[in-house]
Amino acid sequence: MVNLSKELENAKTIGISGHIRPDGDCIGSVMGLFLYIKKTKPDASVHVFLEEPADIFSCIKDIDEIEDAKDCHEDFDIFFCLDCDKTRLGEAERLFDSARTTINIDHHVSNPGCGDYNYIVPKASSASELVYDLLDKEYVDRDIAMALYIGIIHDTGVMQYSNTSPKTVRIVADLLEFGFDFPRLIDETFYEKTYMQTQIAAQVLSECKLFCDGKVAFGNVTKETMEAFGAKSHDLDGIVNQLRLIKGVEVGMFMYELPTGEQKVSLRSRSYVNVAKVCETFKGGGHVRAAGCTVSMDVDTALSSILKCIEEQI
Ligand code: 5GP
Ligand code: MN
């Protein structure tokens, strides 16, 4: 385990980042750690780098302090890579590489650890859970607790997915002691969808197709549809889960086209297909029940190649 207070002791400049297209756990863990370090090291210069978070995360304290790594050229004393390995940091990878000491905190099976110090626990529900492990609990406050709680509920589907452990629930119990309005947080950051998001999901679901005797449900969004709806990638969150929940389906497969013409693929499985293994074949990764990759193929080729891999496990 990383000794956070020891590593931070002599650090004057500290950078924190997470993966490109940040999800709830990435944002929650990064912001939780950011708020904690600012509080415990008031004299240090602490910077947080992420791609622009979705509006739903505006309830997290100091989220407007997030910076674009592109504009930074500092060599940090310590740089943290959260919820991924350094190759998924985007622009911030350069800052990670130039830092004096690097720390990697992650829960992805496919990550062997890329820092001078690594805290990689594949069975942990979320990077947020791992950040909580490392904190001196005496300094955890309501704002830090809320950020980490958001991270945990996002990666566990509100404590529903199989990555939820008794330890996860105990941590959540500790966090709830801070008395924030958790039903509202769950609604507003996890379940609530805008009209546009609902319409785009409805279109995908009404056109989705079943394969492998109904065990795989596939849906996709083209670049043109993204443009017509004015949708960004985070507007598509949750669609893959609805595909997975169709009765009889083991694997939900969702793809959307990036501006580059590549396909961003998300896979979710219900009980036995290891989707991390499927995605690793395409240079992606993730978890046993939730994984992703990006492929330079047209939709039909991507669909048939990935189906072939899934079929080996069905
Ligand atoms: P999503 O389908 O929501 O993009 O991602 C599901 C899980 O797989 C997340 O934990 C995410 O971090 C991981 N993941 C998604 N895309 C990639 C990828 O291209 N490479 C790796 N290593 N992990 C990914
Ligand atoms: Mn995560």
Image (tube, rainbow, N blue to C red):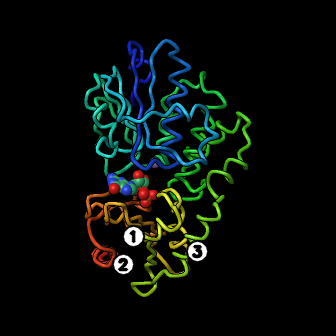
Question: Is residue 65 placed above or below 21 in the rendered structure?
Answer: above
Sort mark 3 into few (<14), some (14-19) or many (20+) by Cα contacts within 10 Å: few
Q: Which amino acid does label 3 sit on?
A: Ala
Question: Is residue 314 placed above or below 88 in the rendered structure?
Answer: below
Asked which quadrant contains residue 187, the reply is: bottom right
104, 271: nearer the viewer: 104
Mark 1, residue position? 273
Sort mark 2 into few (<14), some (14-19) or many (20+) by Cα contacts within 10 Å: few
Asked which quadrant contains residue 282, the reply is: bottom left
Residue at 40 percent across and 27 percent down: it is: 15
Assign the C terminus to one quadrant of the image: bottom left
Quadrant holding ligand 1? bottom left
Mark 3, residue position? 202
The image shows residue 155 at horizontal and vertical percentages of 52, 52
Query: What distance separates the C-alpha of mark 3 from that of mark 2?
Result: 28 Å
Sort mark 1 into few (<14), some (14-19) or many (20+) by Cα contacts within 10 Å: some
Question: Is residue 236 placed above or below 184 in the rendered structure?
Answer: below
The single residue placed furthest to the front in the displayed view is 228
